[in-house]
Amino acid sequence: MEPEEYELIAAVEQSHWWYRGLRNHVLAKISARLEQGGYVLDAGCGTGGTVAALNGRFPSAKILGIDSSPFAVQHAKATAGGHLAFGNVHSLPFPDDLFDYIISLDVLYHAAVDEKQALREFLRTVKPGGLVLVQVPAYDWLWSDHDVVVHTARRYTAGKLRSSAVGAGFGVVECGYRNSLLFPLMVAQRLMSKVFRSDTPRSAVVRHGVIINSLLGAILGVENMLLGRGVRFPVGGSVFAVFRRPS
């Protein structure tokens, strides 16, 4: 991504409904066994919001984050502290079988990322029986100006992400859609942007007012609760999956 995008994310991610909802969903997926210690990698940690949340939730675990952007790592060190480094998902600087969990949120879709090589590295460095949590944007037809700004190379369906994981050697624990209750609003926004096209692509990362941010956050909180109770949505703005390395 462009350095300016990291500046935007760093400015809002601690309070922004999208990032808070995603972090809460991730934390709900991670076992309390990490309270006794363990290793977690945020592969493509961006500006560090998820690393900070994991450090706060699991102080006995070792949380590591890497990102291929020095701008992202600089922001992450200011936000999260701890074990953060410049690194690439194509060649993770870690030994085999190290991590209990690998988290990679909105990373695999980038033009600079070789999806197959990244998944091979995740498989190599996660422990047998360990889990990999992945989120990617959904549906090519939802392509927008934001995709231009963040250098999107591909969008996914649940079936496409599942196929990629199985091809890399993972078992699939779950793979489905999220950002679903707000999906109609997302589709409407995309249609409007095609009608009123801008000459200059703009990021979708904006600071909302308190009321709108709280309302959107509450809707996403309800969705997280439903997902936690086993509800599965047929569509959504993102694909979220949990993969397991075979024992």
Image (spheres, grey):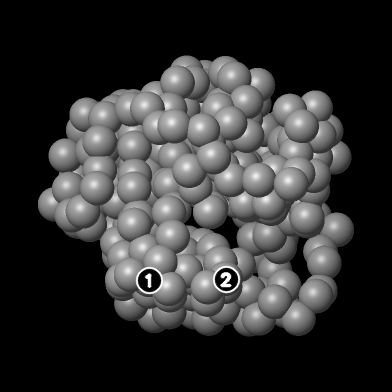
C-beta proximity under 8 Å, tags 2 and 1: no
Q: Residue at x 74, y 47 (%)?
A: 247
In the rendering, which numbered label is found on residue 31?
Answer: 2
Is residue 169 placed above or below 30 in the rendered structure?
A: above
Residue receiving disc 1: 58
156 and 206: which is toward the camera: 156
Rounded to the nearest angstrom, the CA distance separating label 2 from label 1 is 10 Å
Helix, strand or loop under label 1: loop
Q: Is residue 135 left or right of residue 246?
A: left
Residue at 76%, 81% (x, y): give it: 229
Q: Determine the residue positioned at 67% across, 33% down.
A: 155
Q: From the image, which quarter does the N terminus lie in?
A: top left
- Mark 1 nearby-residue class (10 Å; few <14, some 14–19, many ≥20): many
137 in relation to 119, above or below: below
Amino acid bearing label 2: Ser
Give the quadrant of residue 190.
Answer: top right
Q: Disc 1 marks which amino acid?
A: Phe
Taking the image as drawn, is residue 181 in sight?
Answer: yes
Q: Relative to the observer, which residue lies in front, 129 or 131?
A: 129
- Where does residue 87 sit, x and y in percent of width and height? 33, 27
Say which residue appears at 43% left-offset and 54% top-offset.
39
- The x and y percentages for residue 28 are 57, 73
Local secondary structure at mark 2: loop
Q: Mark 2: give few (<14), some (14-19) or many (20+) Cα within 10 Å.
A: few
Q: Nearer the viewer, residue 27 or 186?
A: 27
